[in-house]
Image (cartoon, coloured by chain):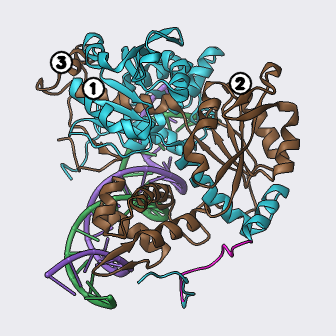
Chain colours: A brown, B cyan, C green, D purple
Amino acid sequence: MATGRTHRPATRSRGIPEATVARLPLYLRALTALSERSVPTVSSEELAAAAGVNSAKLRKDFSYLGSYGTRGVGYDVEYLVYQISRELGLTQDWPVVIVGIGNLGAALANYGGFASRGFRVAALIDADPAMAGKPVAGIAVQHTDELEHIIDDNGVSIGVIATPAGAAQQVCDRLVAAGVTSILNFAPTVLTVPDGVDVRKVDLSIELQILAFHEQRKAGDEGAVTAAAARAAVDASASSDDDRKGPDGDVPAVMPA
Amino acid sequence: MATGRTHRPATRSRGIPEATVARLPLYLRALTALSERSVPTVSSEELAAAAGVNSAKLRKDFSYLGSYGTRGVGYDVEYLVYQISRELGLTQDWPVVIVGIGNLGAALANYGGFASRGFRVAALIDADPAMAGKPVAGIAVQHTDELEHIIDDNGVSIGVIATPAGAAQQVCDRLVAAGVTSILNFAPTVLTVPDGVDVRKVDLSIELQILAFHEQRKAGDEGAVTAAAARAAVDASASSDDDRKGPDGDVPAVMPA
DNA sequence: ACATGTGAACAGATTCACAGCT
DNA sequence: AGCTGTGAATCTGTTCACATGT
């Protein structure tokens, strides 16, 4: 599909690599913490440690944004917070709607990380008429019938889908038709959207499955591990290999022989 | 680099690329859906479409697992479900604990995608004494004091952290000390863990920030701008959001001394 | 005839290592 | 002296295109 229009997977305009974009929020979080502690400057080494990446990567990432550091000194925390915020588009207000106010939707509505970063929950929407009017996180839930209306009134361009899988595509279609161009999908389904609409997905069980994969590998190894791991190993008995570790993916070059 | 070629990876190939591992759950989900519809075989093309990837990538991914397809025909759905499940370690039972039973913890406890994939919620743990004994998703919440005990008794090696950021590292330390070797972290903090412990993290606001980044680009980009995007763009124009640091640049105003 | 499986080419991301500025 | 910023080298992942096998 999508013949004709320029293939634009995301990393075009100013050419900031996608991998870098994905780390900017991480840096921003670390910087915000430093800012709250009134730390005036940081070196790439310190900031990298706080963000859980290595310093070369961090410097390279920042180099795509511009030259915001001072050689021999480091980075000015406040200044960098501003630059990254601006780059991410967080200096403006983003009204978002959350569709599907079950456990997860409610958790998202209550999540403090949104409000503190320029995201404003414009509305909570649920298909259950019994939910309508009920306050969640201080906001009255509205019925799905109002969806188009809400999006239009609030100029919403970002939607969050927290419905059951079966309803997700339908909700997605309505969001898109109403003008939403970015969707964060928590439902375990592949959403089909027209060109120009961005979808990111978070699948909770996928993350666990990836952990299980690595966990399984660990099991084959020596017995100096903990009792719990040893117990788990009884069932696994499959492979033997090193493992990769590390917060966030460091990459020890391990090659099987 | 080791020896030149290592074809013939027999049954259990080592060194499955991380990117491939991350997609296996996706294939598994698509295959499970096909299986439920009693579809006997799929081509790489069909399965790739269902999983939202391209077929070359899928075939390459599967090639790391072994030769499970039939040329000229495709893949046997049931067989592939089994092979991927086994590779991911989902043919065994994984007891997990969820720590921090707030909105998110409760959502996770209720999440059906776990149970259906070999994950069993062994316990829900919260620091609030008032929560103790309260049933969530049919399981009585237990107090943090019991943590070590629970992990030991159930042979838990995977822990899920859904606590506030401030408590996460402490909980993490206790989990690790008690024998947990894989952690799924929902708290917006970088966790420090010893070697051999795997951490994956899910930060809800990070995903939104990445969407905002791309959304911001769309607004300036014109083309097929939707009504909503246009509206958002109006908002954005308050501060000129388009400047570049590139050639001959503008120079940002704020520079501290 | 047809779809898999895979070398080879390509693209993207990470790390190295050091030049260049403060 | 110290730390940033960045080309170059390396590593990882993706796509191409076709030989291979049923």
> Residue A112's spot in the image, x, y percent?
56, 43
Q: Secondary structure at mark 2?
A: helix
Which badge, 3 or 2, comes first in the chain's sequence? 2
> Residue A159's spot in the image, x, y percent?
71, 44
Picture layout, residue B168 above or below residue A83: above
- Taking the magenta stretch, the answer to whether it contains residue B244 is yes
Q: Nearer the viewer, residue B215 or A241?
A: B215
Q: Is residue B6 visible?
A: yes
Mark 1 and mark 3 on one chain? no
Residue A74 in which image quadrant: bottom left
Query: Any mark on residue A166, and which?
Result: 2
Q: How many marks?
A: 3
Under mark 2, the amino acid is Gly
> Residue A56's spot in the image, x, y percent?
31, 66
Q: Identify the residue under disc 3.
A: A227
Which stretch is magenta? B238-247
Q: Identify the residue under disc 1.
A: B180
